[in-house]
């Protein structure tokens, strides 16, 4: 995933998702429900944000009885990922692929990529 891809996924979640709280620190963050996981945008400064340029990372959570978390973030123009718990690197790579494919599928309706810092 490139920096432009990260921006496209963030914009997709921000503009087409809903708002949801997933922990005490983050309130009503942009959220999108994929088939096998959920994704939330996290702000640079908690607890919430209103502008797309305030995105610091994307948190992913598997569905099912035992939630597993992972994070995707952009630093110095490079996209990084980190799985927490028992989320395998293959499953995380697949989730990133699904987010990007979904965003690209509807990306034409979103206009140009947002610039995220």
Image (cartoon, rainbow, N blue to C red):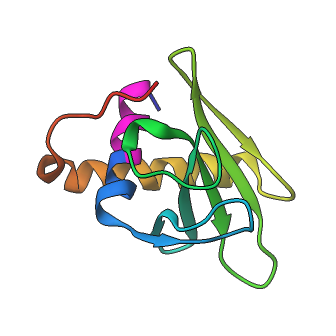
- State the image quarter where residue 57 is shown: top right
Res. 102 visible in picture = no
Range of the magenta residues? Answer: 3-10
- Is 9 colored magenta in this rendering? yes
| Front residue of 48 and 70 | 48
Residue at image location 74% in from the left, 67% down from the top: 24
- Up the image or down, 57 lies above or below 4; here it is below
Q: Is residue 102 left or right of residue 26?
A: left
Res. 30 visible in picture = yes
Residue 6: x percent and y percent? Answer: 43, 36
| Front residue of 112 and 100 | 112
Q: Is residue 22 left or right of residue 36?
A: right
- Is 113 colored magenta in this rendering? no
Q: Is residue 110 left or right of residue 39?
A: left
Residue at image location 77% in from the left, 65% down from the top: 68
- Up the image or down, 106 lies above or below 112; here it is below
Residue at image location 14% in from the left, 42% down from the top: 111
Residue at image location 41% in from the left, 46% down from the top: 10
Q: Main secondary structure of the magenta part?
A: helix
How many discs mark residues in the rendered view? 0
- State the image quarter where residue 36 is shown: bottom right
Residue furthest to the bottom: 65
Residue furthest to the right: 85
Residue 114: x percent and y percent? Answer: 29, 34
- Up the image or down, 116 lies above or below 47; here it is above
Residue 105: x percent and y percent? Answer: 23, 54
Residue 39: x percent and y percent? Answer: 54, 61
């Amino acid at each position: 995933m490139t920096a432009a891809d990260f921006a496209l996924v963030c914009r997709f979640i921000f503009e087409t998702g809903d708002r949801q709280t997933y922990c005490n620190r983050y309130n009503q963050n942009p959220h999108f429900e994929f088939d096998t996981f959920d994704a939330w945008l996290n702000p640079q400064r908690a607890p919430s944000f209103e502008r797309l340029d305030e995105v610091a990372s994307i948190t992913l959570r598997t569905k099912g009885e035992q939630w597993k978390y992972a994070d995707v973030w952009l630093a110095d123009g490079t996209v990084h990922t980190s799985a927490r718990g028992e989320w395998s690197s293959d499953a995380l790579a697949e989730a990133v692929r699904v987010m990007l494919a979904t965003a690209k599928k509807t990306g034409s309706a979103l206009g140009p990529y947002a610039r995220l810092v």
